[in-house]
Amino acid sequence: MASPADLRNWIALLEREGELVRIDAAVDPDLEITEITDRVVKAGGPALLFTNPKGSDHPLLINQFGTERRMAMAFGEPSLDAVAAKLEDVLEMQPPQGLVEKVKGLKKLKSIADSLPKTVRSGPVHEVVLTGDDVDLGLLPIQRCWPGDPAPFITLPAVITHDPRTGTRNVGMYRMQVVDRNTTYMHWQIHKDGRADYLMQDGRMEVAVALGLDPVTAYSGSAPLPKHIDELMLAGFLKGSPVELVKGKTIEIEVPANAEIVLEGYVERDDLGLEGPFGDHTGYYTGQEPFPVFHVTALTMRRDAIYPSIVVGKPPAEDAWLGKATER
């Protein structure tokens, strides 16, 4: 079974396999979706597609990774151990001895080379482009998950930055508290690669945030890779096809062409705000701390874009299965 090409292929696969339920009733992203999702996750239930979230025209997908079966389906493999074996086979490559080993080694190297991201001229993510005063994060059904959260949080992003010295790309999953229609905080903890890129930049640094990716690329943003390993290359290798990228509309960063939604923008050195509290995966609220302010210069989308989300909180929660995949 092949890994899904984009989020819509993934949703179709989940539906065919009886792993997704559509909820057409109007449900509020403010606390209500979390309350429903938390019970479903803890019961080992299906992925949920809220087609009519209050206050937004965009459906919300959640619990896509909430069981081991769905996590393995995301990779197109029968089990997470099979995914691990595929990656281990490359990581443990030894210098080839005989002819057979040399042929096998060349096939592995070709597979890695074929996994590198590929730039294309255009993509569905630019079907709708909002810039300037038209940017409004309120268009999206961003959840406020817990009563002590002061605002909605984007919880399943792929945040793309570059090392200002080497140009190396980093993709990470960092929560983002919404401040207003075109501003969020960026939760770059001190040990994260995104934070390192930020601290090495003297002035303004461009940032892109991709939302609604195929499940493997979405997962790769959470994988704790060494800094010199491109998460999009890992995604391409695990998918068996390269991630297609298109240049942003207001920034130089390339973004996934088949993403549902992309936020383009920038952060400035020493432009900080008090983020939090946040109901965290420990089951407790983390307190307020200063974090960089992310200014959104463009909101680009596919037509009828689907917004992805995840709830963290008292375990077990959906993020446990992202961690289980990494553990394997």
Image (spheres, grey):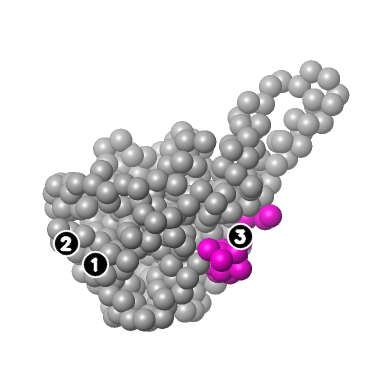
Above-or-below relation of 328 to 291: above
Are circles 2 and 3 on residues that touch, CB within 8 Å? no
Q: Which mark is residue 31?
A: 1
* Image-based side of 71 in relation to 176, left or right: right
In magenta stretch: residue 10: yes
Residue receiving disc 2: 147
For the residues labelled 2 and 1, the Cα–Cα distance comes to 7 Å
**Amino acid type, residue under disc 1 in the picture:** Leu
Nearer to us of marks 2 and 3 is 2
For the residues labelled 2 and 3, the Cα–Cα distance comes to 35 Å
Can you say which quadrant of the picture contains the N terminus? Answer: bottom right
Q: Percent position (x, y) of residue 131?
A: 36, 74
- Where disc 2 sits, the SS reads loop
* Image-based side of 238 in relation to 170, left or right: right
For the residues labelled 3 and 1, the Cα–Cα distance comes to 30 Å
Q: Nearer the viewer, residue 99 or 168?
A: 99
Answer few, some or many: residues within 10 Å of disc 2's Cα (few below 14, many 20 plus, some between 14 and 19). few
At a point 18% along the width and 59% down the height, the residue shown is 149
**Quarter of the figure with residue 234:** top right
Stretch of the chain drawn in magenta = 1-19
Q: Percent position (x, y) of residue 36?
A: 32, 66
At a point 84% along the width and 26% down the height, the residue shown is 100
At a point 14% along the width and 58% down the height, the residue shown is 148
